[in-house]
Amino acid sequence: MMHMQRKFNLTGALVLTLFVLSLVFYFASKTYVSSMNLSLSVQESELTSEIAQKEQTVEELQNEVNTLQEKGRLLGMLDNEVSDNENNIYVIND
């Protein structure tokens, strides 16, 4: 009878130890995943902001290219009668 009780206590202690280790692992994993989620959320915000800035820069550059293309077309239609210097001052050639 004594031998059976000792085996039961050993099994119960083993089960309890396994349960406690499982709880520790669960809370450690949960904390780690939460911190990674927060870190990735911050990184996502930074990347979203950077993408928005780059899209705005691309839009500004596209507008500048369009303006320069229009200027080039206009000067091309005037058959070199008008030229501009480094200060963007237009001079009508006689």
Image (cartoon, grey):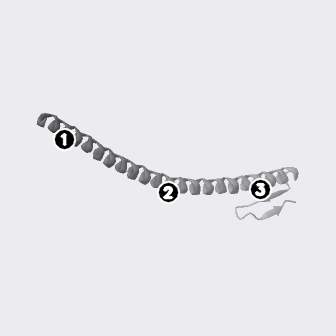
Q: How many marks on residues? A: 3
Residue 17, position as x, y percentages in the image: 24, 44
Tag nearer the camera, 1 or 3: 1
State the residue in front, 85 or 6.
6
- Classify 10 Å Cα crowding around label 1: few (below 14), some (14-19), many (20 and above): few
Q: Residue at x 23, y 41 (%)?
A: 12
Which residue in the protein does label 2 denote?
42
State the residue in front, 2 or 11.
2
- Classify 10 Å Cα crowding around label 3: few (below 14), some (14-19), many (20 and above): few
- Verify CB contact (< 8 Å) between mark 1 and mark 3: no
Disc 2 or 3, which lies upstream in sequence?
2
Residue extending furthest left?
2
Residue extending furthest front?
1
Would you identify the image quadrant in which residue 54 lies? bottom right
Would you identify the image quadrant in which residue 53 lies? bottom right
- Indicate whether 58 appears above or below 17: below
Q: Distance between the residues labelled 2 and 1?
A: 49 Å
Amino acid under label 3? Thr
Which residue in the protein does label 3 denote?
67
For this view, does 32 lie left or right of residue 4?
Answer: right
Q: Which residue is drawn at 69% across and 57% down?
A: 60
Q: Residue at x 64, y 56 (%)?
A: 57
Residue 9, disc: 1
Kindly state the secondary structure of the residue where label 1 is placed: helix
